[in-house]
């Protein structure tokens, strides 16, 4: 299906109709032109959809699609301009178009643009109509099986257990575990999607293996150069390093590993050009008293051999047997249950076409799980799979064809979202927040009813993961909320293929994202050349992926690009002439009239924002988190009419936010609100937030001297939409402050609560089940003073917590028992504990890092794990909350 056509229709019918303020249409007087435009596009879409099904007959479809795609982007720009202008003037209470010269000019420009666009669409309809038969049925019914009604979506947890790896794991153990005093090299070789990494992970996390090796290191080599590889090894060894000299880093690695039994996995090695492997290998300790091992996975057997692995120690995983494949297929497609023998027959026919490849089986199974279990639906999918995949199970192209079948079946919004992965480097770990902000900024996802845009984005990512098109990397153990993700290389190749066809972004012959005059989205690495952007009038999104420096002056090509919706400069470092560079950059940024998402996260030398930031009428998301030197926000920031997210969390030099935040009536997420002292002039206080009725997330930061006034004790309970509250109490010990914090009234709508660096001896009285009866997750951490939960925390016989997830970390004086916690929280399903040495009788480790998960079945044993023993399995556990 043509990405541009469907995107346009969705934008026009849902965004334009639902979101463009009525004032725009009626004041401008262009409602008739908008309606004509929509109807014409629907007609043209019907024609092009028919042509798309018969590309061999209609050679003009590609040209027509490209022209329409360009037209769609122009329409979208026009709609956004109208929305932004309307929101800006609405905030100022102006009737802008009737009097002001700028309003009249804007009205004239919109009118001309609409008339021109409608003429072009009419011409396209006439030309297309002459190509295809005029007897096309323009009201085709939906195909049977497209509805997900009545079907629960399949999730990756259903098939989390690896299949068909028992024999492979046994082989590796026989090679590796016997201790003969030598450094062993093992190779695992096979095509993409065969399960090399899955097999290695299963071995890596095996309890016997964990007990054998005191040091374990995992490096995904395809994403790293030699220097980054060394640094990654040191990170996992928890060794500090401040140098960039390879010899120094290698010496520190050797010192950390000497006289240790270590296991190193070099995953996904493509090449050893440049001699990087020889240098690293020569530096590793190889004492006869050690029992150490290096495992190398690659698609290229020759690479593994040249890395020193003997042929006898190269393992090639076999495709799954029919029995193993069917077990995996059932887990994915049926969730393990099936009753119709005819579906089994068709399913096994589909399975044959997967050639025993786990990735293909899971992908097709995930697709089928979202379909009705009807024989006609499954038969249609079976017939649609390319025959070449059945005949050549190891064919690269046939696997891509199978994966594309899953892409074709995605809903429109998911197609647009998944194409964003094409700009990221291979094996790149992508933060969910960046993806969500990008999707929102470009309008790929947006608020739907009471579901805010970020919630919609999380659902989109979850569905992509459930269809095995995206892999979760870091997620919260309690409920699986994804914090970062990545894409399997084979799926990425398929996505890149589609992205090229749809002109979603520009890529070179090696599938690397590049800047061109036609680029629409760009992920910037250290190798990216920006000068080819000269003359570009299409660029919508620019994000730094593997780059932390960008040279910028008013003369560079990027400074002439005015079409950006998304600009993520996280972690950027300004050059030496930083003040001049920063001024030039802000001059350019504030000229981006359609900019919706701007991130300067973790920009070390960002000290302030210019007043001219108020020019960004369309800005929805502003991220300044971790800008440690940011000292002040301009008051003009309160004039951003469409802002929904403001993030100044962990900006340690920022002591207050400016007055007027209540004017940001659409604000949904506010991170890093600084509670000021009583004397700071022009500071925004808690009482000044009362107007933020749409607030869903609030993070409060307590500063030195922070004080809660008497008239602010009930402010929080007025936020009836608030779902998440984070209080970073800053180890504030002032008795008056603690007393008032204890008297605050939170909203009953809270679902998640985080209390950090709290200096009281007992938890605040308002953390009680009768006051927070919707709370599902509670996290208390980093408090050296907290000794007890309050009496109200424990509830009463008829009033217990509904909490399902609990996190207690770095609370050395907290004296509670497992019995007391269970009694207060009978519905508890997950507990995460770390460094709480005074807790008693807990069913999981409390002095180090551990977790407990309630068994789903009564006869199952509870899941109790020490994360110190399973370090790799639960890596970054502290970041999951």
Image: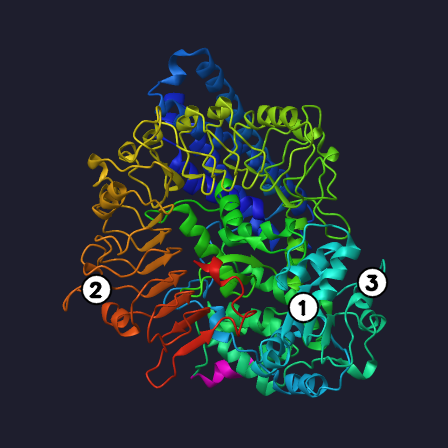
Asked whether disc 1 touches disc 2, contact meaning CB atoms under 8 Å apart, the reply is no
72 vs 559: above or below? below
Please name the residue shown 43% across and 48% down the image.
454
Q: Which residue is mark 2?
A: 794
- The x and y percentages for residue 380 are 54, 70
Q: Which residues are magenta?
A: 339-347
Residue 840 image-quadrant placement: bottom left
Left or right: residue 784 compared with residue 115: left
Q: Earlier in the sequence, mark 3 or mark 1?
A: 3
Q: Earlier in the sequence, mark 2 or mark 3?
A: 3
Please name the residue shown 60% across and 24% down the image.
583
Q: Which mark is residue 279?
A: 3
Q: Which residue is mark 1?
A: 399
Q: Which mark is residue 601?
A: none
Left or right: residue 298 compared with residue 563: right
Q: Earlier in the sequence, mark 1 or mark 2?
A: 1
């Amino acid at each position: 299906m043509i990405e541009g056509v469907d995107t346009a229709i969705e934008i026009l019918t849902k965004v334009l109709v639902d979101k463009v303020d009525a004032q725009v249409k009626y004041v401008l007087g262009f409602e008739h032109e908008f309606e004509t435009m929509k109807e014409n596009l629907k007609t043209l879409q019907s024609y092009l959809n028919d042509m798309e099904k018969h590309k061999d007959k209609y050679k003009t479809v590609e040209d027509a699609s490209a022209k329409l795609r360009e037209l769609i982007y122009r329409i979208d720009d026009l709609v956004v301009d109208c929305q932004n202008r309307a929101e800006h003037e609405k905030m100022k209470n102006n009737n802008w178009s009737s009097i002001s010269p700028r309003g009249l000019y804007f009205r004239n420009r919109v009118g001309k643009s609409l008339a021109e666009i409608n003429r072009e669409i009419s011409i396209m309809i006439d030309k297309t109509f002459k190509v295809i038969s005029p007897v096309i049925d323009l009201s085709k019914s939906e195909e049977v099986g497209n509805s997900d009604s009545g079907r629960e979506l399949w999730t990756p947890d259903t098939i989390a257990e690896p299949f068909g790896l028992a024999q492979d794991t046994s082989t590796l153990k026989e090679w590796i575990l016997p201790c003969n005093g030598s450094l062993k090299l093992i190779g695992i070789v096979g095509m993409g999607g065969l399960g090399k990494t899955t097999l290695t992970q299963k071995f890596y996390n095996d309890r016997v293996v964990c007990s054998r090796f005191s040091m374990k290191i995992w490096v995904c080599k395809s994403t790293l150069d030699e220097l980054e590889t060394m640094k990654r090894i040191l990170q996992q060894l928890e060794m500090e390093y401040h140098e960039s000299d390879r010899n120094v880093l290698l010496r520190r690695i050797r010192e950390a590993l000497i006289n240790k039994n270590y296991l190193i996995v070099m995953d996904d090695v493509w090449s050893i050009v440049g001699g990087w492997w020889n240098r690293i290998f020569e530096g590793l300790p190889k004492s006869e008293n050690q029992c150490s091992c290096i495992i190398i996975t690659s698609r290229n057997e020759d690479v593994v051999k040249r890395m020193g692995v003997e042929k006898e120690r190269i393992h090639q995983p076999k495709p799954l047997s029919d029995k193993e494949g069917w077990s995996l297929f059932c887990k994915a497609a049926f969730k393990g249950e099936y009753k119709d023998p005819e579906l089994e027959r068709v399913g096994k026919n589909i399975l044959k076409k997967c050639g025993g490849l786990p990735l293909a089986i899971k992908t097709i199974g995930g697709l089928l799980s979202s379909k009705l279990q009807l024989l006609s639906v499954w038969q249609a999918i079976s017939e649609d799979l390319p025959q070449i995949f059945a005949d050549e199970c190891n064919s690269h192209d046939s696997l891509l064809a199978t994966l594309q079948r899953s892409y074709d079946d995605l809903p429109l919004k998911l197609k647009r979202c998944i194409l964003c992965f094409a700009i990221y480097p291979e094996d790149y770990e992508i933060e969910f927040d960046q993806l969500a902000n990008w999707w929102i900024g470009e309008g790929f996802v947006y608020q739907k009813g009471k579901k805010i845009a970020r919630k919609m984005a999380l659902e989109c990512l979850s569905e992509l993961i459930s269809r095995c098109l995206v892999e979760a990397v870091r997620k919260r153990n309690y409920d699986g909320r994804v914090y970062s993700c990545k894409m399997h290389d084979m799926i990425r190749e398929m996505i890149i293929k589609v992205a090229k066809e749809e002109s979603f972004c520009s890529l070179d012959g090696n599938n690397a994202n590049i800047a061109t005059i036609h680029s629409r989205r760009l992920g910037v690495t250290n190798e990216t050349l920006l000068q080819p952007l000269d003359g570009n009038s299409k660029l919508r999104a620019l994000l730094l992926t593997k780059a932390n420096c960008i040279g910028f002056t008013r003369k560079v090509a990027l400074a002439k690009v005015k079409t950006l919706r998304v600009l993520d400069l996280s972690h950027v470092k300004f050059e030496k002439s930083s003040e001049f560079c920063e001024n030039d950059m802000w001059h350019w940024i504030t000229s981006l009239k359609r900019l919706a998402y701007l991130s300067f996260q973790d920009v070390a030398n960002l000290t302030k924002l210019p007043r001219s930031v108020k020019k960004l009428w369309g800005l929805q998301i502003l991220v300044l988190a971790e800008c440690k030197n940011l000292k002040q926000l301009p008051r003009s920031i309160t004039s951003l009419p469409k802002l929904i997210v403001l993030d100044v969390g962990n900006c340690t030099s920022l002591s207050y936010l400016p007055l007027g935040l209540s004017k940001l009536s659409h604000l949904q997420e506010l991170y890093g609100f600084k509670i000021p002292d009583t004397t700071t002039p022009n500071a925004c206080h808690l009482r000044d937030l009362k107007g933020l009725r749409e607030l869903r997330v609030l993070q409060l930061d307590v500063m030195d001297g922070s004080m809660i006034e008497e008239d602010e004790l009930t402010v929080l309970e007025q936020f009836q939409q608030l779902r998440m509250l984070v209080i970073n109490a800053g180890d504030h010990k002032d008795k008056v402050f603690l007393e008032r914090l204890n008297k605050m009234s939170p909203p009953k709508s809270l679902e998640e609560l985080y209390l950090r660096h709290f200096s009281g001896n007992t938890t605040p009285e308002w953390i009680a089940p009768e006051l927070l009866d919707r709370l599902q997750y509670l996290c208390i951490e980093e408090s050296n003073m907290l000794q007890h939960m309050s009496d109200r925390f424990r509830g009463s016989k008829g009033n217990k917590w509904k909490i399902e997830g609990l996190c207690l970390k770095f609370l050395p004086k907290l004296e509670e028992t497992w019995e007391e916690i269970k009694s207060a929280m009978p519905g508890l399903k997950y507990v995460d504990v770390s460094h709480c040495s005074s807790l008693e009788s807990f069913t999981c480790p409390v002095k180090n890092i551990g977790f407990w998960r309630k068994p789903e079945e009564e006869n199952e044993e509870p899941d109790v794990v020490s994360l110190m023993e399973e370090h790799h399995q639960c890596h970054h556990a502290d970041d999951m909350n």
